[in-house]
Amino acid sequence: MRTLIVLVFLAVLTVTTFCYESYESMESHEFASPFINRRNAYNFMRTPPRRNSIVQERIRERNKTPQERQREICEDYNPCERYALRHGYAAAYRRFFGLRRG
């Protein structure tokens, strides 16, 4: 009799543990349907017109700062790049290309 009571208690405990719906499991049921209408989907997926941003990006590519140009020159030369990892790109450029003009 005692084992029967213990088994029933364990069965009730396992049923309540595995059948309990927590708040996290209800989050997926917040919407009635997982689908949206076509207009909302189009507005979500449509990219805004970017003509001006593309032009600005190309202008930025043409007008680089002197430090950025020096860094690119230094990155192309392996000893300069290794020196730059330890001492910085400005010091590496001065060491390897400092005497050059232009």
Image (cartoon, helix red, strand yellow):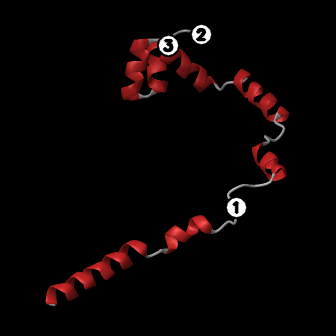
Q: Position of residue 98 (x, y in %)?
A: 50, 14
Within-10-Å neighbours for mark 1: few <14, some 14–19, many 20+: few
Which residue lies at the image location 44% right of the left edge and 21% below the top edge?
Answer: 92
Viewport quadrant of the C terminus: top right
Q: Helix, strand or loop at disc 1?
A: loop
Q: Helix, strand or loop at disc 3?
A: helix
97 vs 49, nearest the viewer: 49
CA distance for labels 2 and 3: 18 Å
Q: Amino acid at mark 3?
A: Asp
Q: Position of residue 11 (x, y in %)?
A: 29, 79
CA distance for labels 3 and 1: 55 Å
Tell which circle, 2 or 3, labels the residue nearer the N-terminal end.
3
Is residue 41 left or right of 85 when viewed as pictured?
right
The correct choice, above or below, for 52 with respect to 37 in the image is above
CA distance for labels 1 and 2: 68 Å
Q: Helix, strand or loop at disc 2?
A: loop
Q: Quadrant of residue 28?
A: bottom right
Q: Which residue is mark 3?
A: 76
Question: Disc 3 vs disc 1: which is toward the camera?
Answer: 1
Q: Which residue is mark 1?
A: 33
Q: Position of residue 76 (x, y in %)?
A: 50, 13
Q: Which residue is mark 2?
A: 101
Q: Position of residue 83 (x, y in %)?
A: 38, 21
